[in-house]
Each structure stands twice: as C-alpha cells, then as structure tokens.
C-alpha cells in the first residue's frame, strides 16, 4: 500500500485524535476486563475446587468479581463500537462530500466520457467500503490485537513455559493472513470493477427502458447483464476458495496443532516435576486462552477481505481525485451588455483524431437574436451543440478564445458566469419534486419573480390548470407534463435567473406546433432584453433572427438574415429550408 492510499484511508481517523483516543481507551479497558474471566476461573479451580475450599465469602467475592468484570467488558465493547461507528460515519460523509465536490469541478468532457453508473459507484459503493474498513476491519483488528496482547500477558504471568508453546500460533497466523492478501488482491479488484460495470448497465437500462421495450431488446440487455454477473461470480468464487483455504481452515488447523503441543508440553512438565509443576486450573485457563488466541487470528483473517476491498476502493477513489480540476476564473465583476465574440475558436474532444470546431470567428452584439442551424445528428459533425457548450463555459476552446464584453470566459468566476448565462437544453433536467422546486433548483426567488418568469415563458396558463399550482408534484423526470410543457418549464427556470445571455439548444426539436408557437412568442418578448443564441432544428423558430449562422463540419459556412440566405441560389441554408418545407408538405 503506497503512502497516498494510506493517507486516504487513515487520515479521517487521525484528524479526530480525541474521539480515536476515547474509543481506544474503552477498547483497552473492555479487553482487560474480558481477559480477567479465565484468570478468575483458574484461581477458583486451583485455590478452591481442587483443594475443596468452599468458604462462602471468598466464593461470593469471586462470583461478584467475575460477573462485574464481564458486564463492564460488555458495556465497554458496546461504547467502543459506538465510538468507532461514529468515526466511520463522519469520515465517510466527509469523503463522499470531497469526491462529489471534486466531480462537480470536473470539465464536462471528463464527465461525458465516464459512464453514469461508474460515477455513482465511486461516490456510493467505494466510499461505503471505507466505512466497512473502519467499523468491520480496523475496529475489529485493534480489538483483537489488544485482546491478543492481554492474553499473552496473562498467560506469561501464569506460566512462561506454556506461553512459549502457545505463542507459536501467532507468527503462523500472520503468515497465513499475508498469503491471503497476496493471493486475493487481484480477485478483489476484479469484483469491484465488475460491480461498477453492473451499476453502469443498470443505470443505462433504467434510463432507456421505454426504447428497450419498444425495440424488444430486453433479452439482449439481460444477457449482457448476466454475462457481467457471471464474471463477477467467478471472481467472487476465487476469493471464497482462497479465503476458505487460508483463513478459517488453515488457522483452525494451526490452533489444533498448538493445542496438541500445549497438552504434550503440559504432560512432559508434569512428569518431570513429579506432578506439582502446573495446576489443573492453569491448564484450563491456557486452553481457554488458546481458543481466544485462535479466534482473534481467525477474525482478523476473515475480515481481511474488507481491508482488500477498502484498498481497491481507495485506489479507485484516488483515481477520481487525480482527475485534474477545471481551472476556474477569478474575475467576479458583473457582466454588463453581454456582447459575445469568438476569435479563432477551435475545439477537440479528448481522444479525438480531429477538431470538432475549426477556427470560428463571430461577433454577437448585445441584445441580438442569433440563430444557429446545420445538419442534425451526432454523425453530422456540424458542431452546433459544442458551440453552445463553449458559450456557457461548460467546455474550453482548444485554441482561440470566447469573450463576453471583451473578457475571456475562462477568466470569469463560475458563479458570475452562471448568473449571467442561462441554458435551455434539448432534454430538460427535471426532478420528481414539485414544479416550484424544479424552477428554483434549491435557490430562492420572490413570488413576483416566479410569476414574471412563468409569464415570459408562456407557462402561466399551465400553472393555473394544475391542482396545486406551483406545489404540484411532477413525478419521475417530470413525466406528468408533456414534452412541450417540460421545455417551457426549462425556459421559465432559465428566465427566473434574469440572465444577460440565453442559450437554447434545439428547444423546439421534439415539441408540438402549439408549443413551438408559444416558444416563438416567448423569444419575441425577450428580444432586445437579453442576448439570444438559439440552435434550431425547426428553421421557423429562428426565421426572425437578426443573424443566422449556418454551420457545417465545425465551420461557419454561411451567415446572414433569413431573407439574405434564401436569396443565395446554391446556399446551404436554402437547401435546408427546402428540405424542411418538403417534409412539412409530406406530413400534411
């Protein structure tokens, strides 16, 4: 285990020295009282049972001491367990927050390249493994180590000769645990990796269940899920076989061998000394202690798989923490008129062979309405959505720069930029809470601002129809609303922030004609109040734009008003307009 991994796993405990010290003191006290049990039994056998001395007062005192020690030991173990559990829960809570905060500061390209289920697994399952490390492994190992030390001290005080025999079990047990760790680490890593893959498959299936059912692909998804499960089963069975051989079975066998040596040693000592060397109570105590020596070693070895899982999980968490943070700007000055300029902007996705955008140059005046069109689809490569990601700061140009009011976006504080630039995506993000919660997204706004945003987004009539108005639950992903209503809700949410720049990404691509008309009216109301950049699939949406940018293969192929572009006989926009018109005629 390297130093960084040790720090990740243990630093949360070391940051709480007082709580750790109290928990350890309770552990030592409870263990010491627990060890007293066989010693008191030995005293009773050798001092009272064998000699036949059954005086009431000494026996009553022994019984009281025995019961009291065991009750106090149980109480100490209970309090110690609570302390370690509290430490573990606090440590995991802080680590989860640290991982989540780190993910929130990642560039969009990194998150896009990582499956959602994989990210969920890192934040939940991997951090849970660390909780098991603290409670299931570390607390148990400390308890068992203290118990071993206490037992060895008690045994040494009783008879050093027999202790020398019993102590042979400890190095043999440590060697067994070491062998288990060496042999099982690869299988443990494989299990956790496959668990993350399984989570990713599950998330994909749940998100796309309607499409899967419509295309009758359920069986294929099930087969892929089962294939991962079978590989996980194979890896887990390897861990089980290694554990069964080296943990319980091997240490049990070692315990039996040491017990046989102990009995043999007792017999030799007894004969050599004429029968008076070791009392029968001492032998009983040693056999009891030997069983207790064996059990801690078995418990440590069996719990060692928790350590393996935590090590693997810690390695995966370190991998996330090693992801470089996005460099955040520090310019907090408010954005004014919101004039946008693109100067030689190029962009290439991580791992891509070529650029997505090629030297874009454009000037978007403050308050202008700019339409962006181009071939639609992931294979078209027009670069429209990538352009919007650059304008809102989700991605950074590979070369060139994007400025707003002459200030590079990369240098503007994230909070300042998000207040000034709002985005309405093609697929709105909606939660299963109320309409109000979805509008505010955890923020605050006055009722007047809410009502104004609803009016501007042409959504006020819908709210009046809902049974509980703004407090009406929307259901999972807002499915109680139509696709058009969800789009208008996303627009209202953006307008609630009173942005200086409003970006719409194919907002009318999947809405009906009535919703498209409402969106067009909303854009007309916003014209001149904010800088509008609208990526449109339906060209009618941006027909009245001040300027239309026609993109193709990551370049601005044409620019002009609707009338200017239609006037070009062989223009790309004219071809798109004709295609759209023919499609409308065919549908009609």
Image (cartoon, rainbow, N blue to C red):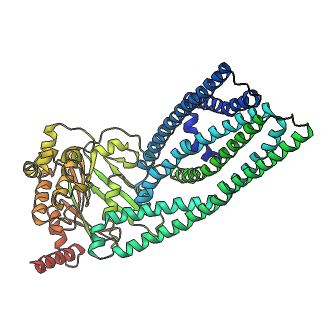
Where residue 61 appears, as percent x and y from the top left, is: 64, 21
Is 279 placed above or below 320 here? above
Q: Is residue 83 left or right of residue 433?
A: right
Write down the quadrant of residue 142 in the picture.
top right
Residue at the image position 21 percent from the left and 74 percent from the top: 576
Residue at the image position 47 percent from the left and 52 percent from the top: 125
Q: In this view, does 213 lie to the left or right of 582?
A: right
Is residue 236 at all visible to an observer of this figure? yes
Please name whichever residue, 425 or 139, is drawn nearer the observer in this view of the structure. Answer: 139
Residue at the image position 90 percent from the left and 41 percent from the top: 271
Q: Residue furthest top?
A: 57
Residue at the image position 7 percent from the left and 48 percent from the top: 464
Where residue 153 appears, as percent x and y from the top left, is: 75, 33
Write down the quadrant of residue 368 in the picture.
bottom left
Write down the quadrant of residue 244 in the picture.
bottom right
Quarter of the picture holding the C terminus: bottom left
Is 33 placed above or below 558 here? above
Where residue 398 appears, as percent x and y from the top left, is: 44, 59
Is residue 25 at all visible to an observer of this figure? no
Please name whichever residue, 309 or 247, is drawn nearer the observer in this view of the structure. Answer: 247
């Amino acid at each position: 285990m390297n130093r960084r991994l040790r720090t990740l796993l243990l630093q949360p405990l070391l940051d709480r020295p007082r709580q750790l010290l109290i928990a350890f003191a309770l552990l030592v006290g409870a263990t010491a009282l627990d060890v007293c049990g066989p010693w008191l039994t030995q005293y009773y056998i050798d001092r009272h049972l064998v000699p036949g001395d059954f005086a009431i007062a000494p026996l009553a005192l022994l019984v009281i001491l025995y019961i009291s020690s065991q009750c106090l030991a149980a109480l100490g173990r209970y309090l110690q367990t609570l302390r370690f559990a509290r430490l573990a829960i606090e440590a995991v809570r802080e680590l989860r927050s640290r991982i989540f905060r780190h993910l929130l500061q990642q560039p969009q390209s990194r998150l896009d390249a990582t499956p959602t289920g994989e990210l969920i697994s890192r934040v939940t399952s991997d951090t849970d493994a660390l909780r098991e490390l603290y409670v299931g492994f570390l607390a148990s190992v400390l308890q068992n180590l203290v118990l071993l030390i206490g037992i060895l001290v008690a045994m040494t005080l009783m008879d050093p000769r027999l202790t020398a025999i019993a102590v042979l079990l400890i190095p043999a047990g440590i060697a067994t645990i070491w062998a288990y760790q060496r042999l099982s680490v690869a299988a443990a890593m494989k299990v956790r990796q496959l668990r993350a893959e399984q989570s990713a498959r599950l998330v994909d299936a749940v998100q796309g269940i309607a499409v899967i059912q419509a295309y009758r692909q359920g069986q294929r998804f099930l087969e892929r899920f089962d294939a991962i499960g079978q590989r996980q089963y194979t890896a887990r069975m390897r861990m089980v076989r290694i554990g069964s051989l080296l943990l319980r079975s091997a240490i049990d066998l070692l315990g039996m061998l040491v017990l046989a040596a102990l009995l043999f040693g007792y017999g030799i000592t007894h004969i050599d000394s004429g029968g008076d060397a070791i009392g029968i109570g001492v032998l009983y105590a040693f056999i009891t202690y030997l069983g207790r020596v064996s059990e801690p070693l078995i418990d440590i070895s069996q719990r060692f798989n928790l350590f393996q899982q935590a090590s693997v999980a810690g390695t995966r968490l370190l991998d996330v923490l090693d992801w470089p943070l996005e460099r955040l700007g520090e310019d907090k000055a408010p954005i004014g008129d919101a004039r946008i300029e693109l100067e030689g902007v190029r962009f290439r996705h991580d791992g891509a062979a070529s650029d997505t955008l090629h030297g874009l140059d454009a000037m978007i005046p403050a308050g202008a309405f700019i339409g962006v069109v181009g071939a639609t689809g992931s294979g078209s490569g027009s670069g429209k959505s990538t352009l919007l990601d650059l304008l809102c700061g989700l991605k950074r140009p590979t070369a060139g720069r994007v400025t707003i009011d002459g200030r590079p976006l990369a240098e503007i504080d994230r909070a300042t930029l998000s207040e000034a630039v709002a985005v309405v995506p093609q697929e709105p993000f909606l939660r299963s809470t109320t309409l109000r919660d979805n509008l505010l997204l955890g923020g605050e706004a006055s009722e007047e601002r809410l009502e104004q945003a609803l009016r501007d987004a042409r959504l006020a009539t819908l709210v009046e129809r809902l049974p509980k108005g703004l407090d009406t639950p929307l259901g999972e992903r807002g499915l109680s609303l139509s696709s058009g209503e969800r789009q208008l809700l996303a627009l209202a949410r953006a307008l609630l922030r009173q942005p200086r720049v409003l970006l719409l990404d194919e907002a009318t691509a999947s809405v009906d004609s009535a919703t498209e008309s409402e969106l067009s009216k909303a854009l007309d109301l916003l014209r001149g109040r904010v800088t509008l950049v609208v990526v449109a699939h339906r060209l009618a949406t941006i027909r009245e734009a001040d300027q239309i940018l026609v993109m193709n293969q990551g370049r601005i192929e044409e620019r002009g008003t609707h009338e200017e572009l239609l006037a070009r006989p062989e223009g790309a926009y004219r071809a798109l307009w004709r295609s759209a018109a023919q499609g409308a005629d065919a549908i009609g």
